Amino acid sequence: MKLCYKRITLTVPVGLLRWLKGRMDYRRAAGGAPVDADGRGLLICRHGCWDLPKGHVEAGESLRQTALREVEEETGLACRLAAGPPLKTYHIYRLFGRWHLKQTAWFHLHTPLRSPEPAPQHEEGISRAEWVDAELWHRRLARSYGTLRQLSRQWTL
């Protein structure tokens, strides 16, 4: 498994990942990579860094439900799930004096419209939401967080 800390990506055995889950505050999140009818991908700019919409799983919610809800909250776009299983990424971070391990499930998503207008959720630190072609989508994510660099290498739009 790949585990990211800041801009470093490490390959760790599954057993080590299980061990970390038992010793850190473990969080689950889900998000998506929306694609419009023209084949362009959506990116958001959160706190000055290109990102994909995502968020924490709420009680009683499935990963799929979380991904759809978070994308709609953060971009205003109602999407539907594409076929295929999610890609899962893991990263660790320190917050309020505690270490956290977060697993994020990423889903391929589609919008039924050609270039629907996204509405960035400013209260979540999202300043922009843009539809971009596949080349720019990959280039921006390649300079983003370690988990998104990993996702960009494994996915095509």
Image: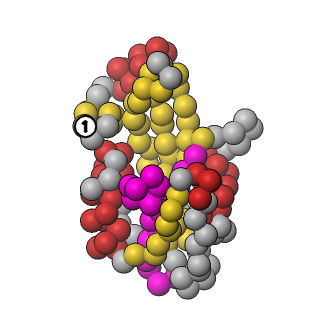
Magenta span includes 2:
no
Residue 112's place in the image compared with 11, above or below, is: below
Magenta stretch bounds? 37-55
Residue 69: name its quadrant: bottom right
Residue 5: name its quadrant: top left
| Extreme residue toward the right, this view | 60
Q: Which residue is mark 1?
A: 8
Task: Point out residue 71 in the picture as x, y percentages from the top left corner.
Answer: 60, 59
- Residue at 30% x, 26% y is 13
- Depth order, front residue of 157/27: 27
Mark 1: which secondary structure?
Answer: strand
Q: Is residue 100 toward the left or the right of residue 66 in the image? A: left
Task: Point out residue 143 in the picture as x, y percentages from the top left corner.
Answer: 27, 56
Task: Point out residue 55 in the picture as x, y percentages from the top left corner.
Answer: 58, 46
- Residue at 39% x, 35% y is 91
Q: Residues within 10 Å of mark 1 (few under 14, many from 20)?
A: few
Task: Point out residue 135 in the picture as x, y percentages from the top left corner.
Answer: 29, 73
Q: Is residue 80 toward the left or the right of residue 45 in the image? A: right
- Residue at 65% x, 67% y is 76
- Residue at 61% x, 69% y is 119
Residue 120: name its quadrant: bottom right
Q: Is residue 41 toward the left or the right of residue 11 in the image? A: right
Q: For residue 90, say whether it is visible.
A: yes
- Depth order, front residue of 85/17: 17
Q: Quadrant of the N terminus?
A: top left
Count of marks placed on residues: 1
